[in-house]
Image: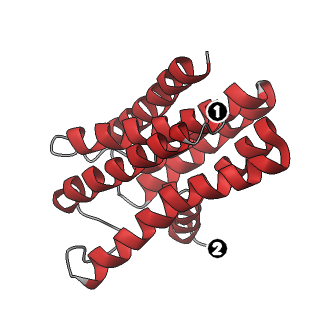
Amino acid sequence: MDRKRVARVISAATRLPLIAVPLFLLVGVAVDGVAGILWGALCILLTSGLSLLYLLYLIRSGRVADPGRIEQGERTGPLRVVAGLHAGAWVLVALLDGPAELRAVLLSYALATAAFALLTPFSKISLHAAGVAGAGVCLAWIFGPWGAVAFLVLPAVAWARLTLARHTPLELLLGTLVGGGLTTLAFFVTVS
């Protein structure tokens, strides 16, 4: 298998909407048992589900040419919409008195996506690195050292994104810091 093909597989597997599915389900089950699966499913629907429907709309309307490689100039508007979707999901789950840990994940997605929208005009920050770093913080918060094993995915993501020439080392570092830092903040504010 050639390097670029492996890099494409790693990149495809670590897209934010895909990371969210097992993340919400794992957190839901860990904090609320079987009922947590339903909470996790609601979070998936409100975040990844609505975000993917919005992406489909952008593709069909011609506003995004290649969904696998959204150019820096095409990112800001969609990121604002997705940040709004995540903020709305956080509000709804909070009003429904959902588990604090799931609210923290939703808040971290809303904060990080808003930060991406603000930073995109200046840098093509790595959403892949942000997603993996945020998931690592979340899993470490919930599962302790066993959850921190998720951070081992970060070097593979960095290698893949560099191999595909999608990001610079600085953009990967920014993504890691924004995703990990805002997830830490969201958990500290919501769960502590």
Residue 133 seen anywhere in this rendered image of the structure: no
Classify residue 168 by image quadrant.
top left
Classify residue 171 by image quadrant.
top left
Q: Which residue is mark 1?
A: 101
Instruction: Tell me which residue sits at (50%, 68%) in the image.
Output: 4
Mark 1 / mark 2, whichever is N-terminal: 2
Quadrant where the N terminus sits is: bottom right
The outermost residue toward the right is 33
Q: Which residue is mark 2?
A: 1
Q: Amino acid at mark 2?
A: Met
Instruction: Tell me which residue sits at (33%, 35%) in the image.
Output: 170
Q: Amino acid at mark 1?
A: Glu
Quadrant where the C terminus sits is: top right
Contact flag, marks 1 and 2 (Cβ < 8 Å): no
Is 1 left, or right, of 168 in this rendering?
Answer: right
Instruction: Tell me which residue sits at (22%, 45%) in the image.
Output: 120
- Helix, strand, or loop for circle 1? helix
Q: Is residue 115 above or below residue 18?
A: above
Q: Is residue 15 above or below residue 125?
A: below
Give me the disc on residue 13: none
Instruction: Tell me which residue sits at (47%, 36%) in the image.
Output: 107
The outermost residue toward the front is 96
> How far from the left and from the top, in percent, is residue 27?
71, 41
Label 1: few (<14), some or many (≥20) within 10 Å?
many
